[in-house]
Image: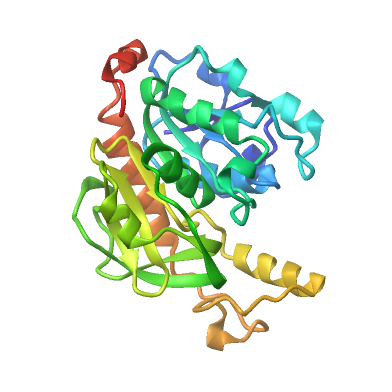
Amino acid sequence: MPIKVPDNLPAKEILRREHIFVMDESVAFHQDIRPLRIAILNLMPNKQVTEVQLLRLLGNTPLQIEITLMHMRTHVSKNTPMEYLLNYYTVFDGVADKRFDGMIITGAPVEQMDFEEVTYWRELTEIMDWTKKNVMSTFHICWGAQAGLYHHYGVPKHPLQKKMFGVFPHTVNRELPLTRGFDGVFYAPHSRHTEIRRADIIKADGIEIISESERAGVYIVMSDDERRIFITGHSEYDPHTLKDEYERDVAKGEPIEIPENYFAGGDPSNAVNVMWRGHSNLLFTNWLNYYVYQETPYDLSELAALGGC
């Protein structure tokens, strides 16, 4: 089944070349089935790259999905032209009266700042509160996960002595539909300067650690009502995303170590070991199937009655 995107979105052509079924709004309009409505709050600097990464994974499903791209009204993007945002994105004011089956809140390069120092923090907390009655399931990624855990449950983030950078093995603590099909040991990329600690999660009410890594720490956290999912890594990353980040920092003269378990033989001149694609596809497919498609009422107005903690 196709993924429905705005007419003429540039990411569409990249996805089509990869044989991912993408449908224009104008074509989908003539179909009678109701697609899943997924909002993506894109906080990453290069929004086009993140779009492709997420749409590629959302398109690997038999479900028809309608995407709404969002950016922050209170933040001026330096890496994505305003014309592009005006053409393909909306701000919270444009969707505040709508409801969605699912929502993704991405990471952002602000993790070394206190949450309250982030210029759009107040707007983001308003959106996160709004999801309680207007979104069936919210999927938080990296800094988006840290922000959600802090806002909803008071879980702090802690600075690391050095960047958690590479591809790390993980295990599952509890079998759930979200982890269905995961290998006993599976890999996922991380790229962050801060961490969420197990002890803080255990002390918080209403959340549970679903997966973690001896090296990278807490990976998947879920709310007890299973409507909020927090992923501390970047399972959506393309094969060369960490390579690009590494070469960028080297070119800037910034202190950066070679990403762990990433280049063959640990040598940046060698090919990349891609070990996380299977996990990544399962993670997003399981989320869409078990926590969005099978749980959301057909009439989205019923979401308000579900409330939220």
256 horizontally vs 77: left or right:
left
The number of callouts visible is: 0
Q: Is residue 209 visible?
A: no
Depth check: give the residue in front, 162 or 116.
Answer: 116
15 lies above or below 33: below
Residue at the image point whose x is 51% and y is 20% from the top: 28
Depth check: give the residue in front, 197 or 145.
Answer: 197
88 horizontally vs 132: left or right:
right
Q: Is residue 205 visible?
A: yes
Q: Quadrant of the C terminus?
A: top left
156 horizontally vs 296: left or right:
right
Q: Quadrant of the N terminus?
A: top left
198 lies above or below 204: below
Depth check: give the residue in front, 60 or 168.
Answer: 168
125 horizontally vs 221: left or right:
right
Would you identify the image quadrant in which residue 83 lies?
A: top right
Residue at the image point whose x is 57% and y is 80% from the top: 263
Would you identify the image quadrant in which residue 15 lies?
A: top right
Rendered image coloring scheme: rainbow
1 lies above or below 187: above
